[in-house]
Image (tube, rainbow, N blue to C red):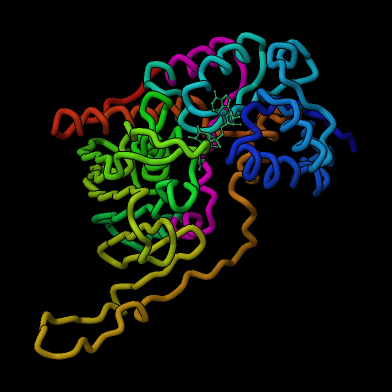
Amino acid sequence: MATIQLGIIMNGVTGRMGTNQHLIRSIVAIRKQGGVALANGDVIMPDPILVGRQESKLRALAEAHGIERWSTNLDECLQDSYNQVYFDSQTTVLRAESIKKAIAAGKHIYCEKPTADSLEGSLELARLAREAGVKNGVVQDKLFLPGLIKLKRLVDSGFFGRILSVRLEFGYWVFEGDWQTCQRPSWNYRKEDGGGIIVDMFAHWRYVLDNLFGEVQSVSCLGVTHVPQRVDEQGKPYDCTADDAAYATFVLDGGIVVQANSSWTTRVNRDELVTIHVDGMNGSAVAGLRECKTQHRVNTPKPVWNPDIPNPFNFLEQWEQVPDNQVFDNGFKIQWELFLKHIVTDSEFRWDLLEGAKGTQLAELGLQSWHERRWIDIPELKI
Ligand SMILES: NC(=O)c1ccc[n+]([C@@H]2O[C@H](COP(=O)([O-])OP(=O)(O)OC[C@H]3O[C@@H](n4cnc5c(N)ncnc54)[C@H](O)[C@@H]3O)[C@@H](O)[C@H]2O)c1
């Protein structure tokens, strides 16, 4: 039984996603569990080097999590052949340039979504990685959420019969930053810094819809900047130049109609921060981050519109929970483990830079639909 040390450059790891999901919940957790076990008894042990701009922050983060390597010099890390993988969770606008350098240095690539701030940029990364023959992957974490795994189980079992429509509600109130601090980075609200909810969330909706229900074929989207001014991390007011809510309709392969609301300007009155309501001929389901409930056609009550009498139904009680039936690990960690296995054993890994580019494509065409006030078809993406 051998231990395979895998050097991983982690850039942008002092950020919200980098620290919490990728470092603590994924790489540190994998190290603590003793690595990723392979079928032949070997174990992959990820060995990260934390990269960023501020040495003090990096050192503190590394020390807090028992990591020995950190650096403020990306080029040096890329030159070191011990580091086989480059991971990027910097802000979106910074990602493409660093990934290009990493590809040129022959590193395998794993990164956050969106992979770049334009479709052209995302496609270029996919093409460069293919030409260089490096393995590559993009975070598609929502596919590994317990609620979505249960929903996929329902789809695969044929529970729905013909799927008619999907209603996707995502959002919560993001504080403006004046009387309560904002819980998201301020660049999210500045278009020039890669912000905007369409760029952010359509990257997710693309792979969720493609993988669960059918390829997205067309989009109609209305974006809005509901909150025109916010206060940044330094307490300074700034103008919001990016959309903070998007009201979209998608049509999928097979004619499935999807309505998707994404908003940082709504107060939650739902079971979870995201809910996906699916109506099929034989049954319906509502999935969230962790839970998924169903109503089969044989259990469907018969409401009659009558405002003259008190509502005789408790609609929310007429649904049945889908059981866990398995242990659910952190979604980011599951995908990391699959990617590490892919690097070492060449096992299948479908979520590559080309798949990531599809997310950028949907965001770009969503923005175009909004600006031109019209439906737009989604062309097939080729490198
Ligand atoms: N998969 C998901 O669910 C998910 C959720 C949120 C964000 N994201 C993506 O992750 C990426 C990072 O988002 P975040 O919320 O962690 O952002 P963040 O602002 O918290 O972190 C950004 C990181 O980039 C670094 N950075 C380097 N140069 C910078 C500069 N000039 N200005 C600002 N930061 C700089 C920061 O130090 C930090 O480590 C984004 O691309 C975002 O779209 C993914």
Quarter of the render that holds ligand 1: top right
Name the residue at 16% across, 34% down.
375
Q: Quadrant of the C terminus?
A: top left
Q: Decide which of 86, 324 is in the foreground and name it.
A: 86
Question: Which residues are the magenta region?
Answer: 122-151
Q: How many marks?
A: 0
Residue 125 placement, left or right of 274: right
Q: Give residue 197's quadrant in the image.
A: top left
Q: Is residue 333 left or right of residue 360?
A: right
- Residue 144 visible (yes or no): yes
In the image, taking residue 164 as reference, residue 17 lies left or right, namely right
Q: Quadrant of residue 24?
A: top right
Q: Main secondary structure of the magenta part?
A: helix
In the visual, does 46 lie left or right of 348? right
Q: Is residue 350 visible?
A: no
Relative to the observer, which residue lies in front, 236 or 286?
A: 236
Pick the front one: 369 or 187: 187
* Membership of 149 in magenta stretch: yes
Residue 198 percent coordinates (x, y): 34, 37
Residue 11 drawn at (x, y percent) = 64, 26
Q: Is residue 105 above or below residue 350?
A: above
Which corner quadrant holds the N terminus? top right
Q: Is residue 150 above or below residue 322?
A: above
| Picture residue at 22% right of the left edge, 39% below the top | 221
| Residue 58 pos. (x, y %) | 73, 31
| Horizontal and vertical percent position of residue 41 | 84, 41
* Vertical comparison of 298 with 1: above or below: below
The residue depicted at 34 percent of the width and 72 percent of the height is 295
